[in-house]
Amino acid sequence: MAMPQTAETAVPHARPAAALRPAPRGRKRDTVPALVMLTPWLLGVTLLTALPMVASLVLSFTNYDLLSLPRFIGTANYQRLLSDPRYIQSLEVTTTYVLVSVPLSVTVALLIAVSLSSTSRSANLYRGIYYLPSLLGGSVAIGVLWRQLFGGQGLLNSVLGLFGVAGTSWIGDPRYSLGTLIILHIWQFGAPMVIFLAGARQIPKETIEASIIDGANPVQRFFRLTLPLLSPLILFNLVMQTITAFQAFVPAYVVSDGSGGPIDSTLFYTLYLYIEGFRNFHMGYAMAMAWVLLVIIAVFTALAFWSSRFWVHYEN
């Protein structure tokens, strides 16, 4: 005898009416403590990030010297960028710095991370030693130390003198001054190294053992196994290091005494922005430079993510 169909038997997946009712008022009250906890963060984002960004965008269209009221001048600041030789020089210096230092820094970090991926006690010691420069590299003290190291009477020339080689003032020679700052950036490979190290430790041992059984040598395992598995982390470190390199300021300011070095050879973008904004009191012009820098970083980041489809490999 067939059972009579009811609403529940005719529609097996139908939910009870109680499940479709709105949430009780008690649950809605739970959002109040959440909003209270989020209030400091919301205030910080609004007052310290959003409003200053809007104000800087507005000021970039004005003539503002920090001492008088801003005067609207339209796109004159942006047009001036195209005819400012020091701005063009700062853009060339910074682009060279980024294109050379970032790939080298990421490569060094990757190689050292792979070599230190073992669990031995000596590896732990070397990890701490290699990470230490990242904690100190952005400080003023390291900038002063770099001047003493690559100066005319610095340690490097003293070592070269032992071999009968006459050195030069590496930070005072426009041919080598930017190279000293590139070396300083590469020396600070600790942060990407830690990220690569965490990724290398996550590679399954069974996969490595299987490749060894198949006869793959260390070089083949590195290029055919390690690199593809770490490619998402390579993309992440490339993007983060690019953003950091474009915003570099302290090394160039300390090493060049805030002047940009000999014939502007170390005139970084942010250093020239600082000079125009806080020395020459062209704050509107400096704001325009800041927004152009934001666009440049966004373009480099977009290119990195666009190219990732060709060389980044994910598990899925």
Image (cartoon, rainbow, N blue to C red):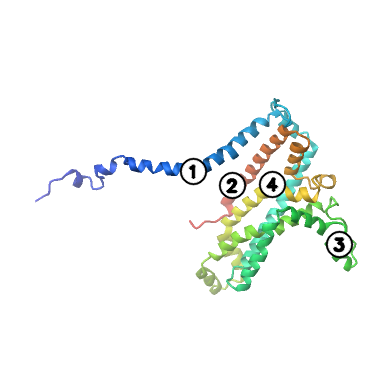
Residue 210 disc label: none
Residue under circle 2?
Answer: 306
> Residue drawn 69% across and 46% down?
247
Q: Nearer the viewer, mark 4 or mark 1?
A: 1
Q: Earlier in the sequence, mark 3 or mark 4?
A: 3
Circle nearer the N terminus (4, 1):
1
Q: Looking at numbered disc 2 in the image, what kind of residue is underneath it?
A: Trp
Proximity of marks 3 and 1: CB atoms separated by less than 8 Å = no
Q: Mark 3 or 2, which is nearer the eye? A: 3
> Regarding mark 3 in the picture, which secondary structure is present there?
helix
Query: Residue 276: x and y, percent?
Result: 76, 37
Please report contact status of discs 2 and 1: CB closer than 8 Å, yes or no. no
Please give left or right for residue 75 compared with residue 89 in the image: left
**Label 1 belongs to which residue?**
38
Residue at horizontal 65 percent and vertical 44 percent from the top: 297
Give the Cα separation between the discs numbered 3 and 2: 45 Å
Q: Nearer the viewer, residue 98 or 273?
A: 273
Question: Which residue does the numbered mark 4 point to in the structure image?
Answer: 246
Determine the CA span between mark 3 and mark 4: 30 Å
- Depth check: give the residue in front, 301 or 187: 187
Q: Earlier in the sequence, mark 3 or mark 1?
A: 1
Distance in Å between CA atoms under marks 2 and 1: 34 Å
Q: What distance separates the C-alpha of mark 3 from that of mark 1?
A: 55 Å
Between 36 and 214, the one lying in front of the other is 36
Image spot of residue 112 (x, y percent): 65, 65
Quarter where residue 35 is shown:
top left
The amino acid beneath tag 3 is: Asn
Q: Quadrant of residue 79?
A: top right
Q: Which residue is mark 3?
A: 157
> Viewer-nearest of labels 2 and 4?
4
Give the number of the mark in front: 3 or 4. Answer: 3
